[in-house]
Image (cartoon, grey):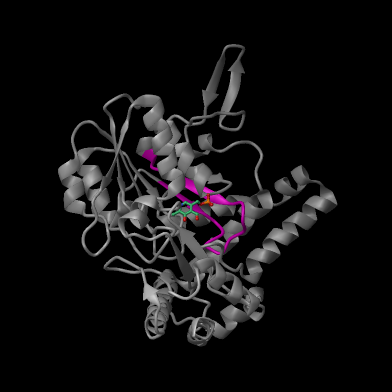
Amino acid sequence: MTTLDIDRLRAETPGCAKVLHFNNAGAGLMPAPVLDAVTAHLKLEAEIGGYEAAEANKPAFDNTYAALAKFLNCATDEIALMENATVAWQAAFYGLAQNFKPGDRILTAEAEYASNYIAYLQMAERTGVSIEAVPSLDTGELDVAALENMIDDRVKLIAVTHVPTNGGLVNPVEGIGRVARAAGVPYLLDACQAAGQVPLDVEAIGCDMLSATGRKYLRGPRGTGFLFVRQDFLGQLPPPMLDLHGAQWTARDGYTARTDARKFENWEYYVAGQIGLGVAIDYLLALGQNATCARIGDLSTALRDGLADIEGVTLHDIGREKGGIVSFSNPVLDPNTVKLRLREQGINCSTSSVSSTRLDMEGRGLEMVNRASVHYYNTEDEVQRFCAALAGLIA
Ligand SMILES: Cc1ncc(COP(=O)(O)O)c(C=O)c1O
């Protein structure tokens, strides 16, 4: 395993000199090469024109597809660049939903993300499809055996969130993939929080579709995301919307849609951001995900241990395997006040409320928690400072 030179990585991260950033589940701090690539492209747009700059930087833009293909272990024509994870996920879901009919079933997980669940509810209203959450094991992750038992020929989609927005849970996505493959049911994975936090290999996972965002654990710019659709599934997934980028208007009464994943894209996009996303992926791949992911695991364990030592603090993370998102609460200050008071000290963390992951939070009687999400560029010293600051607030 490569060892990470944390001093160098922090020197390359301008934000590290300004804040103690434990809000990587919101947006990670961009490393300098990403920032430089984005700003250089924006500057070029200002100097020579947006379209001309895109042509001049086409190799850098094309590199983003190549970097993502390497990152996910897929082909470049299985990737669509999107503006965020939600739009990517929606392109897949609403594409599939065109064929839903009454009695069809969607199977999801208890820690499903609100935006996805709202889309299920809308489609339930429109088409009569039913939504069922697969029960979790006592340890918190989705019960793969229960999923297997729920399969019948009315199940038209398995759609789950890999790492939820509200805590350290990591769902067993490969086990879910084996069930989906065996049953021949389309499998859509929301890997928004997982991308950059745990390695993603679409072959090993066995998903047909995967969506994620650029700005969180990948440390890319805001306003970027991507969708993976497996080659042999592309033909079964019509884009819910098409424009002159996803299709060609070939006759007065006819068009021809693209056959690759770019049929889900549209014509105008954030070129600078997407170039930056490619640089962010290359940066991560150069460091090696074995090292980055292991460090995220170590730092989150240290943070959980430190928080557990503070009187009154309750940890809320579930799951046998836990990632970099640490959730907790205390009886003295509500999560929003904690967030704001820490912000006054240059410390970033966030909150997560029941309305983001309702099934999971209601099931555990939680209204709102604090969310402190660590990245590999954080340090053990920051973990200690964070715990000391929190202890000081609630003493
Ligand atoms: C699990 C999960 N899925 C999807 C999203 C949506 O991502 P985006 O804001 O990039 O659309 C989020 C955002 O926090 C998330 O946590």
Can you name the residue that lies furthest to the front here? Answer: 332
Q: Position of residue 131 (x, y in %)?
A: 31, 38
The quarter of the image holding the N terminus is: bottom left
Report the residue at 40% width, 31% height from top.
123
Q: Nearer the viewer, residue 237 or 383?
A: 383
Q: In this view, does 369 lie to the left or right of 175?
A: right
Report the residue at 45% width, 53% height from top.
356
Which residue range is magenta in the image? 210-231
Q: Does the magenta stretch include residue 305?
A: no
Q: Nearer the viewer, residue 237 or 68?
A: 237
Q: Nearer the viewer, residue 254 or 26?
A: 26
Q: Is residue 216 magenta?
A: yes
Report the residue at 59% width, 80% height from top.
10
Answer yes or no: is residue 379 visible. yes
- Rendered view: 355 above or below 349: above
- Rendered view: 283 above or below 301: above
Query: Quarter of the image holding residue 180?
Result: top left
Query: Quarter of the image holding residue 232?
Result: top left
Q: Is residue 250 left or right of residue 150?
A: right
Q: Position of residue 16 (x, y in %)?
A: 62, 78
